[in-house]
């Protein structure tokens, strides 16, 4: 990631922030700290577990995207789209708008920089097929 554009680094930062927010939501939900969620403890723990799975997925995707994984790019687009859509299918409040913004911003940045994520990774410093062909010598 040494030579990544600033918008790529910002998108990865936002993905990490999104993971932290979902983890925090899971902790607050599990502890019963959300007054509007008057569900039995089992349901609160299910909600917390789902939030923690989402947080883990987002953190893993951020890590894989920093290594320019093509499958991670497509999973990130799908997951962020699902989170953004589900954020507005509920009653809209401040927390929903924050979740929408934190999911939509990296989604937009990922789409903007898709050529960087989908370009073949040459991180090992080895020559690509094109470079090797340029340096090949013909036999005498």
Image: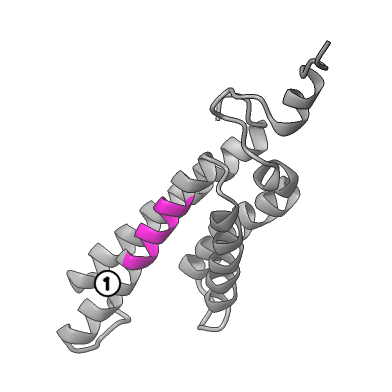
**In the image: residue 17, left or right of residue 42:** right
Q: Which picture quadrant has residue 1?
A: top right
User: Is 52 above or below relative to 88?
Assistant: above
**In the image: residue 90, left or right of residue 39:** right
Residue at point 23%, 69% (across, down)? 33
Residue at point 30%, 65% (across, down)? 52
User: Is 63 above or below relative to 95?
Assistant: above
Q: Which residue is mark 1?
A: 48
**In the image: residue 63, left or right of residue 136:** left
Which residue is at the front of the view, 28 or 138?
138
Residue at point 80%, 15% (across, down)? 139
SS of the residue under disc 1: helix
The crowding category of the residue bearing disc 1, from other C-alpha atoms within 10 Å (few below 14, some 14 to 19, many at least 20), is many
Residue at point 53%, 67% (across, down)? 79
User: Is 35 above or below relative to 31?
Assistant: below
Task: Please provide the residue range marked out in magenta.
Answer: 53-61
Which residue is at the front of the view, 8 or 115?
115
Q: Quadrant of the image for the C terminus? A: top right
* Figure coloring: one colour
Q: Which picture quadrant has residue 130?
A: top right
**Where's residue 105, x and y in %?**
63, 54
């Amino acid at each position: 990631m040494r030579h990544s554009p600033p918008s790529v680094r910002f998108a990865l930062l936002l993905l990490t922030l999104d993971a932290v927010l979902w983890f925090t939501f899971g902790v607050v939900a599990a502890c019963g700290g959300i007054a509007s969620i008057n569900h039995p403890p089992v349901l609160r723990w299910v909600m917390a577990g789902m939030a923690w799975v989402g947080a883990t997925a987002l953190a893993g995707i951020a890590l894989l995207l920093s290594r320019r994984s093509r499958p991670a790019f497509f999973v990130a687009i799908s997951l962020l789209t699902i989170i953004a859509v589900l954020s507005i299918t509920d009653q809209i409040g401040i927390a929903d708008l924050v979740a929408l913004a934190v999911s939509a911003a990296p989604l937009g940045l990922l789409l903007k920089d898709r050529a960087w994520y989908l370009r073949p990774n040459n991180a090992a410093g080895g020559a690509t097929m094109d470079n090797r062909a340029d340096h090949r010598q013909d036999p005498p």
